[in-house]
Image: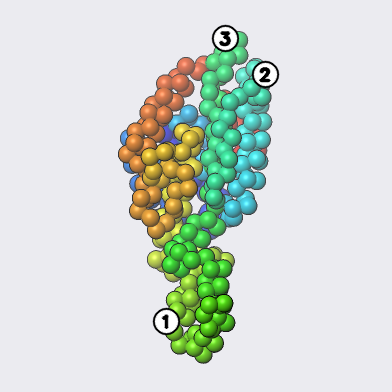
Amino acid sequence: MANTLYIVDDDLFSRQPQLVRDTTLAETQNLFAFVSGFKVILQQPSKFPTRFDFTDSVVKVVESDGDVGAFHNQSVRTQTANLAHSAQQNGVTLNTGTQKRNAGVPERGGIGFQSKDILTAGSQKLAFVLTGGAASLETVKEAVAEFNAGGRSRNEILADKKNAIEGTRTRKGLGLAGYYGRHQALVDIRGLTAWDLVEKPLSDWPKDDQISVATALARLIAHEARHQYIAPHYNGGGLGASEASLWGDKNFAAFDKGDQKEVSVALANFTKLQKTATIHLETNPTNQPFPY
């Protein structure tokens, strides 16, 4: 289906709390509301389409930042092999080595990559769609934890606590009793409690924080889906900007108006380009490895 963002509803995402799943879906849909007819679908791997339109995107939620690069490499290899298999099924030998591709340099906790083009093979015009993205739960958990900790990292809180108790070169320490008698101790405890949640499953998080994490996750998913339509970051700010904040800064809570226009134009151009194809290759052929 055209203009569809598929979120992979695999074992990891399916075991997240229903509140997180529902909020992520609704918030991602809302972020793309500026595109007429745009759909966001939670899709189980077994129900994925065999082929994608040029205006489609796919994002897989991964557990940690370290999983992002591994997913990217595996997905590109599998999609490339699948597309070559599909070409062979149509009597065409596909030379994928000459394809231009958004290499998809990993960002903090996410990646988006794509190669969508029309390839010429004799008299045939092949619609070639290699696309995908990943969004890390670790990154969105940390974004919410950092906000709840007043913008301080765990190490910064521990350093502030140590300096308060033991003192510094220019300030005498309070000692344990003095420290725990100060308001700073309560602030530090709240901050460390926020960071402790990062190591726990989302089912153990308070409901309000689950909603915060899901909203931040939707923003990361939308950011990486955008890279499957437009490779560069948007230089005018908003959610499409480089290093967009996922939580706590309203300036990055949505796509900038100018970015929305560029995304809409990119989707329209992809639609026109796809119409020139005579054969649409399958990115996810039946009985071939699932690329996501």
Q: Residue at x 57, y 9 (%)?
A: 123
Q: Which residue bears the numbered disc 3?
A: 123
Precedes in sequence: disc 2 or disc 3: 2
Instruction: Using the image, determine if residue 6 lies above or below residue 22.
Output: above
In contact (CB < 8 Å): disc 2 and disc 3: no
**Kind of residue at badge 3:** Ser
- Please count the marks in the image: 3
Q: Residue at x 53, y 40 (%)?
A: 112
Using a 10 Å C-alpha cutoff, classify the residue at mark 3 as few (fewer than 14 neighbours), some (14 to 19) or many (20 or more).
few
Q: Quick one: SS at disc 3?
A: loop
Instruction: Using the image, determine if residue 7 lies above or below residue 183.
Output: above
Q: Which residue bears the numbered disc 1?
A: 183
Asked whether residue 103 appears in the rendered view, the answer is: yes
Q: How far apart are marks 1 and 3 (CA)?
A: 76 Å
Q: How far apart are marks 1 and 2 (CA)?
A: 70 Å
Left or right, 278 with respect to 82, comes to left
Q: Quick one: SS at disc 1?
A: helix
**Kind of residue at badge 1:** His
Q: Which mark is residue 93?
A: 2
Instruction: Using the image, determine if residue 274 lies above or below residue 121.
Output: below
